[in-house]
Structures are given as structure tokens and as C-alpha cells.
């Protein structure tokens, strides 16, 4: 079964196509802003999910105070579009990036994260080139073992280093607690806060993050803002995490069934170069709305292997199906544009302007 | 430790960067052509790995008779560059694609694969639009359970359908045997061949595929050509499969260590949006040449998690390392350009012209 809208999109945009429902996008923006408002923290959405200045501006128009970018190249795209309050939540390293960071400072209010002295030393060069003070938040690890200093003592030491570095301004702390890690994050933050106050410093930004942390937003006493990424579109992971319903999933991959060589199996024209191999810890690689019992069991690069054993309804060759991907952030990054729909109408396309901005 | 070349690339191109060693690329082209020549089959490289018309033309200059593309959009890029013998090894479906296929026919000699009657019916429309005969090979499954008819009887029936379809020309068979599946492929092919001969048809193309099948090339009696993809660059999977050495791996991801928050761990600026979550069945996500005992154990989108427990040498923050990825085809597709080096010199960049051509 192919819906009339899917037939239209296949006809005009071919498949595989990324399709976003703008009613749901707008509802997601409003919902997240309301969560932040209720929690008394600012909303600083992470654009890594949508990579679109148009969507970012919708988030700002909806009440967001600024945006978060993971990579400098993403921030450049956003600044080019006129967005002027950007947190780069990532350790930036190297002369090439420092020159670009300095240029970015001239165009937007930029805050960058750091978790070590090498990064901080580099950032002084950017500030020296731009001649503008550069705001630095200290990334703190509270259980994820990704980036971030592991102890409050290290955070305090880096705050001192920032204070004593030409051109740098201590701006505060960035945390990304696990869903169960907020009490530990509170203890970490309280100790770090006391330490920096003893140095005569006061954070202006205390930033928490993560869509799976929806229910925890505001529970860190002292937090000033939260970074939501995936919530703009949501996905199978967020539904599994209990922070979104299927109706909150605003993005579908439209894919054509191109082969049904056996009765219990089929092939989609969406493989690992479309849906990616990110499982997000889930079984299968996406929910097919038309055939929820069908399983996308594995991929070749351009083939999605459909296991139809448990599916009473089975698509025919040529059917166009709609898929909620496991992890929407990586899927968006595979496409140059998304098709925007409202109800059953296509209303246009949107470039994924910061797609592939890895640097 | 950062090599002088890595320092140069980080300075001029930033990281993460894709770097190809042109001496090795040329050696890989020559090696594969020699394998095909020795086996008495034509070489029809699959451009899905490099997605570059420049590299494709090097392969043709080296002796390849034409190229293979997985997607129509890839074939369009190649035809735009003047490549004129293209096999699209994929079921193409839908009016949008048929119009594009017809346009492509006017620019290049095109052969397309099909494994079912719906696809064949569609292809007649492309031929009707172009007014040019369209060559069709029948995709046969011999164990992979991907696309491809499962029995010789179905293959023969489709050959009859192609023969009886306006504008279509039966061109032969396309197979992609598993490494151990060649005897079964031979039996399948022999039966299908006898059947189509009984219909008065004779295949002009009998195409086998796969870099892991390097040692099997030519062992299908009646094969006319082989499709090599990954062999242009090779990767950790091909080394594990025993069909390439580390010295045959022509592509590295250059990545900067951006965090060392704990003594036994580190973070690379290459995550799932760079190296992808394809494991290729291997442990870890790539070999770090400078620290072969280090393990890239998991990813966030822009973070590669380094487990240094078993590594005696450990990189410092700011070090640029070279990674042989698990599966090079999907990694190339994340980048807009590759940096070309020869020895210790950068000689230029090459656009990944067909990157993201999913349609």
C-alpha cells in the first residue's frame, strides 16, 4: 500500500526521500520550549539533528535563546544565516580551526567548550587573532565517559587557567548527564561552583543536554539552559526512551520496495548509505508505518533487507513505505535536502545546509 | 605522535580528513586489472566505493571496459564526465527514474539489472521515452538473499519477458556469489543459460562481483566480467578477508585526538558521522596506524571513543592519527572531498562527486 502523499513524493522527488511533517516540527518546537519554560531554564537547541538554519530560526522564533553546534563548520553555516548566539559544544584544536573561530567571533556571539589545557591554549590564539574576548565553558563528564573533565578539581583548575589566559572569559559549565546521573551531576557541579567562586568567578552558563533527559530538565539546581537535539524530529530511540510518542516523530524516510525475490523477504532502496548502521540499541533499523511487523533486519549499502516473516501484510514491488528511523540525527546527515509536507501536501524542500560539516 | 604529513594535512585541510595515497590507488588499479586479465574476464569496477569520475577514468585507462553504478544518480554523474559504458546493478522503479534513465540512454551505453516483472514493465517506459533499446541483465541470487531471482526457472521466465518487451534487449546475467557460493552459482548459471538458449537468446554479459571474491574471479565458466568495488581503496574488512594487505589500504581517515580525560581513554574528532557505525563484523571501528593496540570502541555522532587500556603508546591531545576504516565505501560517502597524497606530499583534492547520490 502506498499513500497518496507517498506516491506524490516518489513521483516528484524519487526515493529514498527524507520527509518532514511541518505541523509536527512546529508542535515539537512548542513542546520543548514549554518544557524549558516550565523548568525555568533557557532553551538552546542543538542543530546537529536538523542542520538547517531555517529550522534553527524557527526554534529561536519559538523562544530559544540561541543554538548549540557540535562542529565549527556547522556554526559557520548558522552564522552565515544570521544566527548570533552559538555554543560550540566541542573541543576545537588546530591553527586552521582557530583562524576560522576568530573569523566566526566577528560575526556572532560564540561560546566554546573545553576540557583540557591544550584546547585552552589554542583558544587564546583565536582570541588573539580576532581581538575579541572568547567565552569558554568547561565540559564536565558526569558518567558518560565521553569528553569532559572527570573531577570538580580539574574543572576548577581549568577555570583558573581560563581566567589567567589572555583573551578568554570563563563562561561556566557544560554537562551532559546520563538519564540517571543527575544527582551525581549536582554533586559535581556544586563542588565545581564553590571552587570557581573561590577564584572570584561566577558562571553565566550552566548548560545541560540531551533529549532523553526531557524529564530531568531543570532538575540540576543552578542550570541556566538545556540543549535539546533529537526532539526536533524524534525517532524510534526517543520513543523507546519514553520521551516521544510515534505522533511526535516528524521525519520519515520514504523508500520503495524494489525486490520481493522470496515470499518472506523484500528489499528496500534504503540501505546503510541512507538509514545508516546505527542501531541505537534497538532490534531492527526502523519502524515501517505501513507494516509495523516487518523488520528491517540488515543492510547492504543501498539495500535494506526486509524480513516479512511476522508481517501479515506484505508490500509489493513498487510500494513506497514510510520509515521512522532508529536514529534520526545520522540519517538527516546522509541527505542534501528534506521535503516538507503539511497534512497531505508538499510545501517545499529545505537544504540540509550543514550536512557533512565535519570540520 | 603526528607524522609530518598528518601535521600538514591538519594545517591545510583540518580534521577529520579523508586522505588517499595515489601510489597505492594506482597499484590497486593495476593489481585488479592483472587479476581480471589473468582470469580472462573484463574488469567493470563498481564506483560506489570512490564515487569519483576521475578515479573511474583512471580505472578505464588502466584497462577496465566500463563501470558499475548502484544508483541512477551515480550513473548520471559518471555520464556527465564522459564515461560511456555503464551497468546500473540495481532495480530501478518509478516514473521519475524512468525519465532520467531515458535521458541517460542518450548519453551513454546503459545496461540495467532487473529481478522482477514490475521493474521490467517500468524499463519499457524508459526505452519508449528515449526511443533507444535498453539492455537488461537479470540479477540472480545465489545465496546472499539480497536482490536477484532465486531460481533458474524465474531467470528464464524474466528473459522471455524481456525478449517480448518493446524496447528491451536481453543482455545476460548478473551474479554476486558469496565467497563459498561459486559452485552453486555455476549450477544456477548453467541451467539459466540452457533455458535462455532454448528461447533463442544468448547472454553478452555474465557479470560476477565482489572484492572478497578476488580469489574466485574467472572461476565461473561463462563469466564475461567481474565487478570490483572496495579494491580501489581496501579497508580493514578486506584485510580480514585475506584479499588485501595493510599496504594495499590506500585510504586513511586523519583524525585529531581532542580529549584525554582519563588515562586509559581518549576521544577522536571522528564519530559515527565520519567513520559510520558499520562494523563489517569486526571488533572495533578501525585500525589506528600509530597505535594499533588502541581500540575505537564506540561512537557518538562526532566523538570516537578510544580505549587505550591495551595500548602501550598513547596519543596526546592534539595528536593527529591515521585510521584504516572498517568499511571504506560508507566512509567515503560521508565526505565531499578526499585529499590526494603521493609519498609525503599533498598533490591536491578530489571531489567525491557522486556522494549522497541515493536516488
Image (cartoon, coloured by chain):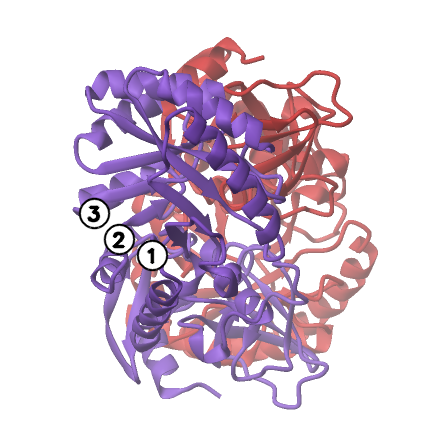
Chain colours: A red, B purple
The answer to whether tags 3 and 1 share a subunit is yes
For disc 1, the marked residue is B43
| Front position among marks 2 and 3 | 2
Of labels 3 and 1, earlier in sequence is 1
Which numbered marker is on residue A323? none
Mark pair 1, 2: CA separation: 6 Å
For disc 2, the marked residue is B65
Q: Secondary structure at mark 3?
A: loop
Q: Is residue A189 above or below residue B152?
A: below
Of labels 2 and 3, earlier in sequence is 2
- Looking at the picture, how far across and down is residue B333, in whole percent? 42, 52
**Quarter of the image with the N terminus of chain A in it:** top right
Give the side of residue A59 with respect to residue B75, left or right: right
Closer-to-camera residue (A28/B193):
B193
Which numbered marker is on residue B83? 3
Place residue A353 in its image quadrant.
Answer: top left
Give the side of residue A255 with respect to residue A54, left or right: right
Closer-to-camera residue (A165/B59):
B59
Question: Can residue A133 be seen here?
Answer: no
Q: Residue at x 34, y 52 (%)?
A: B44
Label 2 Cα neighbours within 10 Å, binned few <14 / some 14-19 / many ≥20: some
Q: Residue at x 58, y 23 (%)?
A: A27
Of labels 1 and 2, earlier in sequence is 1
Q: Is residue A295 above or below residue A344?
A: below
Amino acid at each position: 500500500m502506498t499513500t497518496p502523499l507517498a506516491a506524490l513524493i516518489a513521483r516528484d522527488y524519487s526515493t529514498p526521500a527524507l520527509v518532514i511533517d511541518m505541523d509536527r516540527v512546529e508542535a515539537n518546537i512548542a513542546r520543548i520550549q514549554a518544557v524549558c519554560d516550565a523548568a525555568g531554564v533557557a532553551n538552546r537547541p542543538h542543530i546537529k539533528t536538523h542542520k538547517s538554519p531555517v529550522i534553527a530560526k524557527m526554534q529561536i522564533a519559538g523562544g530559544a535563546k540561541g543554538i548549540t553546534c557540535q562542529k565549527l563548520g556547522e556554526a559557520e553555516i548558522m552564522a552565515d544565516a544570521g544566527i548570533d548566539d552559538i555554543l560550540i559544544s566541542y573541543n576545537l584544536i588546530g591553527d586552521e580551526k582557530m583562524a576560522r573561530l576568530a573569523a566566526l567571533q566577528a560575526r556572532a556571539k560564540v561560546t566554546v567548550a573545553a576540557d583540557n589545557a591544550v584546547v585552552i591554549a589554542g583558544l587564546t590564539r583565536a582570541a588573539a587573532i580576532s581581538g575579541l574576548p572568547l567565552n569558554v565553558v568547561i565540559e564536565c563528564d558526569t558518567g558518560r565517559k565521553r569528553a569532559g573533565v572527570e573531577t570538580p578539581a580539574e574543572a576548577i583548575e581549568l577555570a583558573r587557567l581560563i581566567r589567567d589566559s589572555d583573551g578568554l572569559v570563563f563562561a561556566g559549565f557544560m554537562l551532559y548527564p546520563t538519564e540517571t546521573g543527575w544527582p551525581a551531576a549536582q554533586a559535581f557541579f556544586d563542588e565545581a561552583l564553590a571552587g570557581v567562586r573561590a577564584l572570584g568567578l561566577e558562571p553565566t552558563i550552566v548548560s545541560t543536554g540531551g533529549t532523553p533527559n526531557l524529564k530531568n530538565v531543570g532538575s540540576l539546581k543552578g542550570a541556566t539552559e538545556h540543549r535539546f537535539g533529537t526532539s526536533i524530529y524524534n525517532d524510534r530511540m526517543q520513543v523507546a526512551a519514553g520521551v516521544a510518542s510515534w505522533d511526535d516523530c516528524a521525519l520519515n524516510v520514504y523508500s520503495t520496495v524494489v525486490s520481493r525475490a522470496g515470499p518472506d523477504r523484500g528489499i528496500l532502496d534504503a540501505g546503510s548509505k541512507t538509514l545508516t548502521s546505527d542501531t541505537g540499541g534497538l532490534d531492527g533499523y526502523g519502524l515501517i508505518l505501513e507494516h509495523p511487523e516487518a523488520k528491517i533486519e540488515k543492510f547492504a549499502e543501498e539495500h535494506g533487507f526486509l524480513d516479512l516473516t511476522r508481517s501479515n501484510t506484505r508490500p509489493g514491488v513498487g510500494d513506497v513505505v514510510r520509515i521512522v528511523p532508529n536514529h534520526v540525527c545520522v540519517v538527516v546527515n546522509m541527505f542534501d535536502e528534506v521535503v516538507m509536507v503539511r497534512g497531505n501536501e508538499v510545501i517545499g524542500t529545505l537544504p540540509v545546509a550543514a550536512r557533512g560539516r565535519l570540520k
